[in-house]
Image (spheres, rainbow, N blue to C red):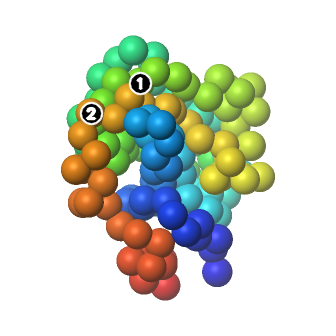
Amino acid sequence: MSKIVEGLYYTNTHEWVKVQDGFAYIGITDYAQESLGEIVFVELPEEESSLEAGEELGAIESVKAASDILSPVTGIIVEVNDELEDSPELLNEDPYENWIVKIDLESKSELHKLLNSTEYKEICE
């Protein structure tokens, strides 16, 4: 069973969101990294670009497949996790500690459309 962290928001496309100080940190779930296998490349977006919820923010390539990363929320990218460019395997080691982007969250109301940990667990079963 994949690890699911309480207190985060989830999407049915296996991204997670952690909200802290008005910013949304976005990453992929443990289920996603397990499904992808060994991650070999992460395509990161440009800082200061704007994203709409549901829009592609980047991509992940593994030895098995490539997968788009979709933004769960709308906002402006204020930071990308540059460590992933040189060490994409960090997402395999701990997908919840290694976020992909930090977004200045436009509207907290979008969070109500996302899944809580219990709802996400049901999707993964």
Which quarter shows the N terminus?
bottom right
Q: Residue furthest front?
A: 21
Residue found 36% across the figure and 67% down from its top: 115
Q: Secondary structure at mark 1?
A: strand
Query: What's under tag 1, amino acid-wise?
Result: Ile
Q: 109 or 86: nearer the eye?
A: 109
Q: Is residue 11 above or below residue 68?
A: below
Q: 111 or 101: nearer the eye?
A: 111
Looking at the image, tell me whether mark 1 or mark 2 is earlier in sequence order.
Answer: 1
Query: What's under tag 2, amino acid-wise?
Result: Glu
Cα distance, mark 1 to mark 2?
Answer: 11 Å
Horizontally, residue 92 falls left or right of residue 2, namely right
Q: Residue 98: x and y, percent? A: 66, 43
Horizontally, residue 24 falls left or right of residue 99, namely left
Q: Is residue 119 above or below residue 48?
A: below
Q: Which mark is residue 41?
A: none
Query: Where is mark 1, residue-wise?
Result: 77
Q: Is residue 119 above or below residue 53?
A: below
Residue found 50% across the figure and 42% down from its top: 20
Which quarter of the picture shows residue 14? Answer: bottom left
Q: Which mark is residue 106?
A: 2
Q: Residue 32: x and y, percent? A: 55, 60
Q: Residue 16: x and y, percent? A: 48, 54
The answer to whether residue 119 shows anywhere in this view is yes
Q: 110 or 64: nearer the eye?
A: 110
> How many numbered circles are shown?
2
The answer to whether residue 59 shows anywhere in this view is no
How packed mark 2 is, by other alpha carbons closer than 10 Å (few <14, some 14-19, many 20 or more), is some
